[in-house]
């Protein structure tokens, strides 16, 4: 099966890449919410669109290359530890 942690991590990583990417996952993944992370990344200026159900994968990501963001607001959401 697909892992939500991997989907979240890849969403953040691909935002920092250059190019257009699609993250899909299996049908069960399309039911798992990811809107908290997507909203935080969109607020930081990253281009992410929902391709089907609002708030869940699949996602289209328009990577614009590396940007600087405050990791405190998204660290836990993308699976990084810390406190």
Image: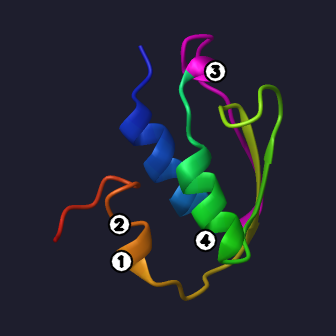
Q: Quadrant of the N terminus?
A: top left
Residue underneath mark 4: 16
Q: How many marks?
A: 4
Tell me, yes or no, whether the two marked residues, 1 and 4, touch with CB atoms within 8 Å.
Answer: no
Q: Earlier in the sequence, mark 4 or mark 3?
A: 4
Residue underneath mark 2: 75
Which region is colored magenta?
17-31
Which label belongs to residue 72?
1
Q: Left or right: 49 with respect to 56?
A: right
- Choose mark 4 or mark 2, whichever is in front: 2
Q: Magenta includes 18?
A: yes
Task: Using the numbered discs, state the Cα–Cα distance from disc 1 to disc 2 in whole angstroms.
Answer: 5 Å
**Label 4 crowding class (10 Å Cα cut-off): few <14, some 14-19, many 20+?**
some
Task: Using the numbered discs, state the Cα–Cα distance from disc 3 to disc 1 in whole angstroms.
Answer: 27 Å
Which residue lies at the image location 73% right of the left edge and 40% below the top edge?
59
Which residue lies at the image location 63% right of the left edge and 54% below the top edge?
38
Q: Secondary structure at mark 4?
A: loop
Measured along the vertical axis of the image, is residue 17 above or below residue 78? below
Q: Secondary structure at mark 1?
A: helix
Q: Earlier in the sequence, mark 3 or mark 2?
A: 3
Q: Earlier in the sequence, mark 3 or mark 1?
A: 3
**Label 1 crowding class (10 Å Cα cut-off): few <14, some 14-19, many 20+?**
few
- Choose mark 1 or mark 4, whichever is in front: 1
Q: Position of residue 52 (x, y in %)?
A: 82, 26
């Amino acid at each position: 099966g697909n892992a939500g942690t991997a989907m979240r991590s890849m969403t953040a990583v691909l935002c920092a890449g250059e190019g257009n990417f699609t993250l899909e996952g299996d049908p069960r993944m399309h039911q798992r919410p990811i809107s908290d992370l997507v909203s935080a990344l969109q607020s930081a200026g990253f281009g992410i669109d929902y391709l089907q159900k609002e708030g869940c994968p699949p996602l289209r990501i328009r990577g614009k290359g590396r940007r600087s963001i405050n990791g405190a607001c998204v660290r836990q959401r993308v699976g990084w530890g810390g406190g």
